[in-house]
Image (spheres, rainbow, N blue to C red):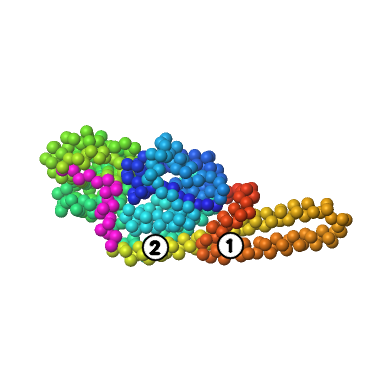
């Protein structure tokens, strides 16, 4: 099986592009079902977060989908041509795809290096793919290894300090305001990201805390949880009123799952004057964005989206340099070990195909020469067959020895592909390949 990943993240594509091809949970489930129907012999895990979209694919050596087909598949899922977002996509194959997943799961590829939320998001994506039936043995082994690598990476100390997007957003607030006891903060969105951000915001001890959500019951549930766990009163604001209440808000953190902006420039236009043009901080950590960019054009407004948070995270990197170096060493060692293991597993079917190929050639030549022999005895037949077998074994010795040796340095696939081409084994190997096996379905 060949492994590849196609995707984008906060470095390769701006938020405007990422939000066009983001998948919520329901859309991801539909996409996985469509993938299984379009590519029944392949495996797929779809990871979609506020900072990245990635499709991890395992396919037969000569099968589908290829990288271009994965890009087209993403476009079909959203009803847009792949050409409109292809410039923001990256792709990796085989060992590079393995390395990328290990770095992602270990948070080495995150906006905030060392944040632990991504590991949970990757696990959730893996479990969703298992439920959809798009995980077989190859991706099961790969992702289980990635989860173990992430734990080793986290043990280096890379997770120390303020790591999540929510905590970074609060750090940004500290750069705008010198005190918070006279400030009113509002959270729009009572999902997991909003809740995590809210917990970090409590460290600032804001004067008033408001919670709103499209579902009032969910907002009330979150407010009650904050009161019980943190002893902080939180007022629930009806969703229909939250924009009008912005005149009294100093810090707004928005993180909903809306597909359209929930705060437009037209809706916000009267707010600054009603506030007396006092500064207001708007932090939009949703993808797609909750707040129209034009809202930030007023001089009293500080509007930051999730890409802007990258500037804040840079200041936190210096203290983690040593841990990052150790974490990268762990990833490289684990990549090499995984590739060696997979290469050795892949050798068996290739060697078997190579032997069958040589045996078939020998059998064909034996069948061709036999009618030309004058009354060969059974013993003559056996001697000729033994000779063909010995010739086959001697001819195969060096190629197989070469493959086994290179399984220890991670270059087996180069030589394996060379042998496939030299002896034209592609079609024979495809015919001999067993049906894709499903891996364990109990998660990790």
Q: Position of residue 274 (x, y in %)?
A: 13, 37
**Is 316 colored magenta in this rendering?**
yes
Q: Is residue 354 left or right of residue 379?
A: left
Per the rendering, the mark at residue 403 is 1
Give me the C-alpha separation between circle 2 and circle 1.
28 Å
Q: Which residue is found at the position 63% from the left and 54% from the top? A: 423
Is 98 left or right of 62, judged from the image as shown? left
Residue 69 drawn above or below residue 177: above
Q: Nearer the viewer, residue 173 or 204?
A: 173
Residue at (15%, 39%) from the top-left corner? 272
The residue labelled by disc 2 is: 328
Q: Could you say where residue 249 lies in the image, as x and y percent from the top left?
A: 18, 43
Q: Secondary structure at mark 1?
A: helix
Q: Quadrant of residue 404?
A: bottom right
Camera-nearest residue between 231 and 110: 110
Estimate the x, y position of residue 376 in percent, counting from the top left.
86, 57
Residue 178 screen position, x and y as percent:
15, 53
> Range of the magenta residues?
300-318
The residue nearer to you, when weighing 210 against 396, is 396
Is residue 60 shown to the viewer in this render? yes
């Amino acid at each position: 099986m060949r492994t590849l990943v196609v995707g984008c993240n906060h470095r390769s594509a701006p938020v405007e592009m990422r939000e066009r091809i983001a998948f919520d949970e329901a859309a991801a489930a539909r996409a996985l079902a469509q993938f299984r129907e379009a590519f029944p012999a392949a495996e797929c895990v779809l990871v979609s977060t506020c900072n990245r979209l990635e499709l991890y694919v395992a396919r037969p050596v000569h099968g589908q989908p290829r990288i271009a087909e994965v890009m087209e598949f993403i476009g079909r899922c959203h009803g847009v041509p792949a050409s409109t977002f292809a410039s923001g996509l990256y792709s990796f194959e085989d060992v590079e795809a393995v390395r990328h997943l290990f770095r992602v799961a270990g948070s080495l590829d995150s906006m905030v290096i060392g944040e632990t939320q991504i590991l949970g998001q990757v696990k959730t994506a893996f479990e969703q793919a298992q439920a959809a039936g798009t995980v077989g043995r190859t991706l099961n082994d790969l992702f289980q290894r990635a989860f173990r690598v992430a734990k080793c990476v986290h043990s280096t100390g890379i997770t120390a300090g303020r790591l999540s997007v929510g905590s970074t957003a609060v750090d940004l607030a500290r750069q705008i305001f010198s005190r918070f006891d006279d400030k009113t903060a509002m959270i729009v969105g009572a999902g997991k990201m909003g809740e995590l951000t809210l917990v970090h915001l409590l460290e600032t001890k804001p004067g008033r805390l408001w919670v709103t959500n499209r579902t009032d019951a969910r907002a009330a549930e979150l407010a009650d949880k904050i009161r019980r766990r943190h002893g902080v009163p939180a007022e629930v604001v009806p969703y229909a009123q939250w924009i009008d209440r912005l005149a009294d808000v100093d810090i707004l953190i928005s993180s909903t799952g809306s597909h359209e902006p929930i705060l437009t420039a037209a809706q916000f236009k009267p707010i600054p004057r009603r506030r007396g043009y006092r500064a207001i901080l708007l932090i939009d950590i949703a993808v797609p964005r909750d707040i129209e960019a034009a809202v930030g054009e007023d001089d009293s407004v500080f509007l930051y989206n999730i890409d802007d948070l990258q500037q804040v995270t840079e200041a936190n990197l210096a203290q983690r340099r040593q841990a990052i170096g150790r974490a990268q060493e762990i990833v490289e060692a684990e990549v090499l070990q995984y590739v060696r293991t997979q290469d050795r597993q892949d050798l068996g079917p290739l060697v078997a195909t190579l032997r069958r190929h040589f045996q078939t050639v020998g059998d064909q030549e034996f069948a061709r020469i036999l009618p030309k022999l004058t009354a060969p005895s059974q013993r003559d037949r056996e001697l000729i067959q033994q000779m063909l077998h010995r010739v086959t074994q001697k001819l195969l010795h060096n190629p197989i020895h070469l493959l086994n040796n290179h399984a220890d340095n991670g270059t087996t696939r180069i030589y394996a592909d060379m042998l496939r081409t030299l002896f034209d084994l592609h079609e024979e190997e495809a015919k001999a390949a067993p049906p894709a096996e499903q891996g364990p379905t109990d998660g990790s």
